[in-house]
Amino acid sequence: MTVVYYLLLFLHFVGWAIVLGGTVTNIREPKLANGVLHGALTALVAGILMTGVAEMADGLPELNYVKIGIKLVVAAVITALVIVAGRRKDGPSSGLIGAIAALTTLNVAIAALWR
Ligand code: HEM
């Protein structure tokens, strides 16, 4: 289970890195990079599975469910904004792409700094 947990954590990091990289580099000339929706969904599903695995198996980190809950709400908003950005016929605005990048950065801060 430990291997599964850390493989999921790896996918979680790669997924959010795709979302952040694919948006922060495209704020000035706004567009949604290919793969951002897949990155968000992969990271979201990996996070949810990790939470279950950590609860089931011994020897894995104790989870802070308030922190996870807040991250889940923010991640749901991010995913919704990515879907909206992908559907805009005239392309997404800088504000929309910037909001996705900012919320992802906020969640990295919550994940890393809240102990
Ligand atoms: C934009 C959204 C998210 C970002 C940027 C993010 C980022 C991170 C980061 C940087 C870590 C490593 C923290 C550390 O090891 O000290 C982490 C860990 C983790 N994340 Fe996320 N995460 C997000 C959303 C979620 C969601 C939605 C869930 C589950 C519903 C989740 C579940 C977890 C779990 C279980 C861990 C490992 C244990 C912990 O550090 O709390 N994450 N995440």
Image (tube, rainbow, N blue to C red):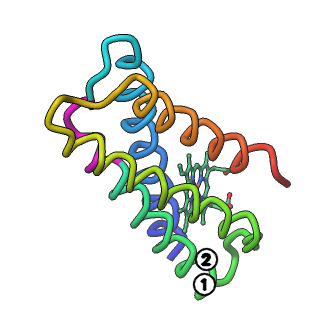
- Relative to residue 63, is residue 77 depicted above or below? above
Q: Which mark is residue 54?
A: 2
The residue depicted at 40 percent of the width and 22 percent of the height is: 94
Q: What percent of the width, then of the height, locates residue 87?
A: 19, 45
Magenta extent: 32-39
The residue depicted at 47 percent of the width and 61 percent of the height is: 76
Q: What percent of the width, then of the height, locates residue 77?
A: 49, 56
Q: For this view, does 27 lie left or right of residue 63?
A: left
Mark 2 against mark 1, which lies toward the viewer?
Answer: 2
Q: Nearer the viewer, residue 4 or 48?
A: 48
Q: Which mark is residue 57?
A: 1
Query: Which element is circle 1 on?
Result: loop
Q: Quadrant of the C terminus?
A: bottom right
Q: For this view, does 1 lie left or right of residue 85?
A: right
Residue type of the residue flagged with mark 2? Ala
Residue type of the residue flagged with mark 1? Ala
| 110 within the magenta span | no
Q: Are marks 2 and 1 in contact (CB under 8 Å)?
A: yes
Q: What percent of the width, then of the height, locates residue 46?
A: 43, 64
Q: What percent of the width, then of the height, locates residue 99?
A: 51, 35
Query: Which element is circle 2 on?
Result: helix
Q: Nearer the viewer, residue 68 or 9?
A: 68
View extreme (left): residue: 89
